[in-house]
Image (tube, rainbow, N blue to C red):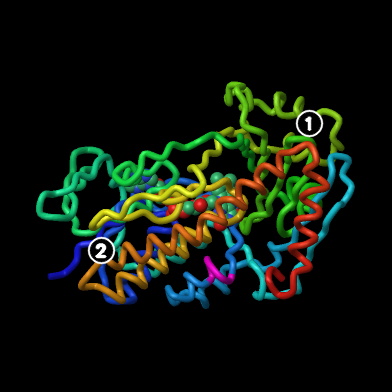
Amino acid sequence: MKMRIAIAGGGLGGLTLARILRRHGLDAVVYEREASRSARSQGGMLDLHPESGQQALAEAGLTGRFRSEARPEGEEHRILDQAGRTLVHHKPHPGSFSGRPEIDRRALRDLLLDSLPGDAVAWQHRLVAATPRPDGGFGLTFHGGHKTDCDILIGADGARSVVRSLLTDAKLSYVATLVELSISDADRRHPDLAELVGPGNLWCVGVNQILAAQRLGDGGIRVGISLRAEDRDIDTYRSKRALLDLFEGWDSRLTALIEAGDSAPTPRRIEAMPIGTRWANQPGITLIGDAAHLMPPVGEGANQAMLDAAELAGELAANPADPDTAIRTYEEAMFTRTHPIAEMSARVQAMMLSPTAADDITRFFTARTTEPAAAD
Ligand SMILES: Cc1cc2nc3c(=O)[nH]c(=O)nc-3n(C[C@H](O)[C@H](O)[C@H](O)COP(=O)(O)OP(=O)(O)OC[C@H]3O[C@@H](n4cnc5c(N)ncnc54)[C@H](O)[C@@H]3O)c2cc1C
């Protein structure tokens, strides 16, 4: 009998999984809470690593499309101190795909969506409950009351996963505050800022705080301010004035990034799961991506979500008669792979928001960019 596979969540992990399963002749339905692919802005750029995100796209048969959408020049990055002095300036080799080319999240998600038939994604299906059935599989209930059944349930439903609670009671902890602003049409409206940011990423590093900016494929700039987790009400940061006060004494060419924001800043809490979270294997259910291992956002989450998808799809395709063994094998390998990455992400996050961040980050990037072939 055909396995009915349900994937909760149509983010990068869920869509990559659906695509690779389909290439192996296994159908899955992705249940996504958003109303359509354009319901929400997908955020900034991601750099896809050869050994994870790019590997998954290769298994999805999408390397060609990735290369036509990616922006290798987006790998360029500069690190400045709060006086505007350049500490690190990394430029990729022109046109090189050998490193970690950047791609807009929207373009990456569209590329995955375009690779699936229209009925593979059930939009406007927010999973609210999953209940094990006595004869195996799960009953699924969606917001609005719609119900369905599946044999295998894969939680790809992100940071606040509903499926996670069926496997582990791991609690999220608050690790940082991120405040975002966007600047549209930067070349025309703010040529000085466009030049400051360049084609990739800019990090201006202070004491316990970072002002970062990222060039987007549509000509805009996404500004992100990272602050330590603290007790202060997050709504404090909904005003540019409050942010500018935090950056008093910084070079005005840098704080101009805050002043130029198109609208009021959007603050949010950044959370993470306990490092090394595991769960006891259960028949017919597992997690991928942020649902499985939410980490501080230092460049690994999407890459690992996509690699989870590729590895799980590979196991299910290799062992379709015994999906429980396939899931167990996937989980063991995923726990082992992601544990050190979660440790590293927590270390980097702490380093970025420390009093000595400028020196520490400079050392970190100088070491990374001089590694032979690994990153560049
Ligand atoms: C500011 C920031 C910057 C980042 N930068 C990078 C980076 O440079 N590189 C990198 O690799 N990672 C980065 N990450 C991490 C990365 O965004 C995530 O790890 C990645 O998106 C996880 O993919 P996912 O598919 O598991 O979850 P998501 O991308 O969160 O997708 C989950 C999907 O599930 C849907 N959903 C949620 N709940 C339900 C429900 N109940 N029912 C149905 N659907 C549901 C959501 O709408 C969403 O579409 C960053 C994260 C942040 C916050």
Any magenta on residue 148? no
| Range of magenta residues | 50-54
Q: In the figure, is residue 262 to the left or right of 188?
A: left
Sort mark 2 into few (<14), some (14-19) or many (20+) by Cα contacts within 10 Å: many
* Image spot of residue 98 (x, y percent): 66, 75
Q: Visible in this render: residue 106?
A: no
Q: Which residue is mark 1?
A: 247
Q: Does 286 appear above or below 125?
A: below
Q: Amino acid at mark 1?
A: Phe
Q: Amino acid at mark 2?
A: Asp
Measured in 3D between alpha carbons, the distance from the residue under mark 1 to the one under mark 2, in whole angstroms, is: 53 Å
Of residues 157 and 32, the one nearer the viewer is: 157
Q: In the figure, is residue 60 to the left or right of 317?
A: right
At mark 1, the secondary structure is loop
Q: Does 153 appear above or below 371?
A: above
* Image spot of residue 56 (x, y percent): 47, 70
Of residues 59 and 113, the one nearer the viewer is: 59
Q: Which residue is mark 2?
A: 324
Q: In the figure, is residue 199 to the left or right of 134?
A: right
* Image spot of residue 216 (x, y percent): 64, 55
Q: Does 72 appear above or below 247?
A: below
Residue plotted at (47% across, 74% down): 62
Q: Quadrant of the N terminus?
A: bottom left
Any magenta on residue 51? yes
Sort mark 1 into few (<14), some (14-19) or many (20+) by Cα contacts within 10 Å: some
User: Main SS type for the magenta part?
Assistant: loop
Residue plotted at (29% across, 44% down): 166
Q: Earlier in the sequence, mark 1 or mark 2?
A: 1
Can you tell which of label 1 and label 2 is closer to the viewer? 2
Disc tally is 2
Q: Visible in this render: residue 317?
A: yes
At mark 2, the secondary structure is helix
